[in-house]
Image: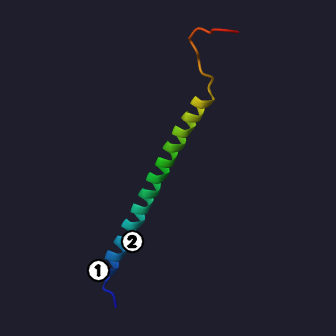
Amino acid sequence: MISENKKTQRRHVNILSDQLQNFMSQRNLDQAIASTRNASVQIQEINEPKKSYGLRIGS
């Protein structure tokens, strides 16, 4: 039979493990959101027409 102290320790370990998994999931989510924002900015930059301030020669 497992003592109450061991049960309590296991419960605490399980709680800490869950908290760590939640933290890592949130961190991964935050990184994914940041990557998506960066990609969105890069796509906007690609899709925006380039502004040319130079002289046009020809036509």
Q: Quadrant of residue 39?
A: top right
Residue at image point 49% right, 51% down: 29
Q: Quadrant of residue 21?
A: bottom left
Residue furthest to the left: 5
Compare residues 54 and 21 and report the one nearer the observer: 54
Amino acid type at circle 2 is Asn
Residue furthest to the right: 59
Residue 28: percent from left, percent from top? 46, 53
- Vertical side of 14 occupied by 24: above or below: above
Q: Residues within 10 Å of mark 1 (few under 14, many from 20)?
A: few
Residue furthest to the bottom: 1
- The CA distance from mark 1 to mark 2 is 14 Å
Q: Are marks 1 and 2 in contact (CB under 8 Å)?
A: no
Residue 52: percent from left, percent from top? 58, 15
Horizontal arrangement in the rendering, residue 11 relative to residue 34 (left or right): left
**Disc 2 target residue:** 14
First in residue order: circle 1 vs circle 2: 1
- Vertical side of 31 occupied by 37: above or below: above
Give the structural element (helix, strand or loop) at label 2. helix
**Disc 1 target residue:** 5
